[in-house]
Image (tube, rainbow, N blue to C red):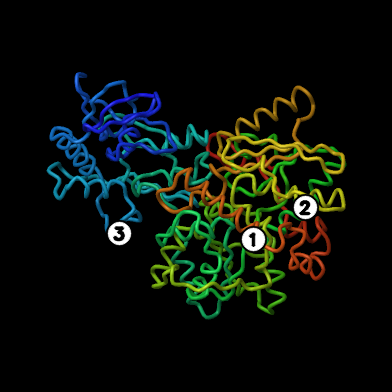
Amino acid sequence: MIKAKINNVDVEVPEGTSILWAARKANFTIPTLCSHPDLVPGGQCGICVVEIEGIPGLKRACMTPLGEGWKVHTHTARLMEIRRQLVELILSYHDTDCLTCIKNNNCELQALAATLGINTVEWHSLEERLPIDRSSAAIVRDPNKCILCGRCTQVCSNMQTVNALAVNHRGYSTVITAAFDMGLGNSVCINCGQCVVHCPVGALYENSHIEKVWDAIHDPDKFVVVQEAPAVRVMLGEEFGMEPGTLVTGKMYAALRRIGFDAVLDTNFSADLTIIEEGTELVSRLKTGKNLPLITSCSPGWIKFMETFFHDMIPHMSTAKSPQQMFGALAKTYFAEQRGIAPEKIVSVSIMPCTAKKFECQRPEMRASGFQDVDFVLTTREIGRMLREAGIDLNEMPDEKADSLLGEYTGAATIFGTTGGVMEAALRSAYFLVAGRELESIDIAPVRGLKGIKEAEIDIDGLKVKVAVAHSGGQARRLMEKVQDQLRNEGKSEYHFIEVMACPGGCVGGGGQSWGSNMAKRARRGESLYAEDRSLQHRRSHENPSIKVLYEKFLGKPNSEKSHTLLHTHYYKRSTVDGDIIAEQ
């Protein structure tokens, strides 16, 4: 432990603790624009500088470990003036159209300028505007608002290991761009949106579908159906000031009805369906031993990551679509048939914690219904904005239920929203499909939590099934390289079943979540999903009564020809340079 004084307040912290975090323990906040609790400090902005008695010069608090006996000062007159000048300099190169900026009232630069009492900027303002990059289906990049904090490049390179963003040029001309300035949509970007979540300003944000959804809602000739991802029910409350992880399922349904959706359904229904299709696929592969391990495919960011960097693993991928896309295919077939609605009149909207879902819904193979299966995707942030625009406060909503046809779900479906949840849900049903009886203890603790790679072994009627779970691109890369080595050197992998999510924490950490997120908030959201799982009558996907009716009336049986037409897909080999498809697998 290190003992020191910060602004004459005694503080004791573990050795290696930065001054920035030590100061917070002493109840002092040192301002910063580049530091983030989930990232390695880089010291790019320089705003967190402090003075240390007996040590010449200034030290960056985010990068400097507290020393024994140090006397640190965080807000002397000299430091306060330096910080104002640094922020003013950043503002002089920053597009300050705050009132129309997507991050207005959520911008760390805006908040810091107000905190420091900056009312005017003496430096010359931005004169030359750079083009906004709208090439991506998922993410918009505005270089005029970039403050070169480096968070996005660190996330993309270190956490996700994608390297779609990089610092280019030098000095006054320094910018952060995609490779060769070709635009994010023409890069290896996997659309995960982690750069968006970690950006402190409005330089990165989702490609919005809000206006298109409003147009559909206001069109009397359209029947607009909406689905909501498992994670949204423990994230949407944060848009309205609730504590992270607050479960708002019933309030969410009520708010969506009031906003004007014609049918309020639930992605959790198709999450249960995914388990039945994927579980049946797993059982088949366990019996034949062919193309093991089976890898789940619910994360579109992971799918593009795999197609780009690990396309030799395509034969190991489950062909089952994600719950979003299964739902979209059924909305314009089964739902349309049961409700007597012409499928061309149905507009299918999904609410997701994920920016990559915007890319997924536009993939050309996602038209199993004869139409684009999912028309528009809204992030958690976007639906929050729409509700506020309509004058709806989620806090004031009563609890209502989803429409029954595609709205009933089990606890297994709701835990899809957190890392390890898909694996746990699949094992609950796979055990039944293999053994013909229920798994006694369905809380599979080894696959839970935020450890980067988790492993477990489940005994299914004498068959030892070894599974692995990875979340974030970096952890997925580690796991896939291990599997590749095993397949290459030994002819088989030690694993039978693998779950991968592109975002840290799984969907509760998606790129479309509320601003200001971190791993601690993601953990709380995950715990709320497990709590809802425990509260539900049915906790295994194969127990969902509405799923049983779906197969009886429409699909026939799992993995049937009709199921494969509507609910399964295929993948491509992509270039590692620009992400373009170069050969179909």
Q: Amino acid at mark 1?
A: Ser
Question: Seen in the image, is 580 located left or right of residue 462?
Answer: left
Which of the marked residues, 3 or 1, is nearer the chain's N terminus? 3
Q: The residue under label 2 is which amino acid type?
A: Ser
Which type of secondary structure does the marked residue at label 2 adopt?
helix
Identify residue for label 1: 535
Marks 2 and 1, how far apart at CA:
18 Å
Q: Nearer the viewer, mark 3 or mark 2?
A: 2
The quarter of the rendered structure image containing the N terminus is top left
Task: Give the mark toward the camera: 3 or 1.
Answer: 1
In the picture shown, does residue 396 fall above or below 378?
below
Position of residue 15 measured from the top left corner of the image (x, y, whole percent) = 39, 23
Instruction: Specify few, some or many for label 2: CA neighbours under 10 Å numbering under 14, 14-19, or 20 or more.
Output: many
Q: Please tell me which residue lies in front, 568 or 558.
A: 558
Mark 1: few, some, or many residues within 10 Å (few <14, many ≥20)?
A: few
Crowding near the residue tagged with mark 3, few <14, some 14–19, many ≥20 C-alpha atoms within 10 Å: few
Q: In the drawing, what numbered circle is on residue 100?
A: 3
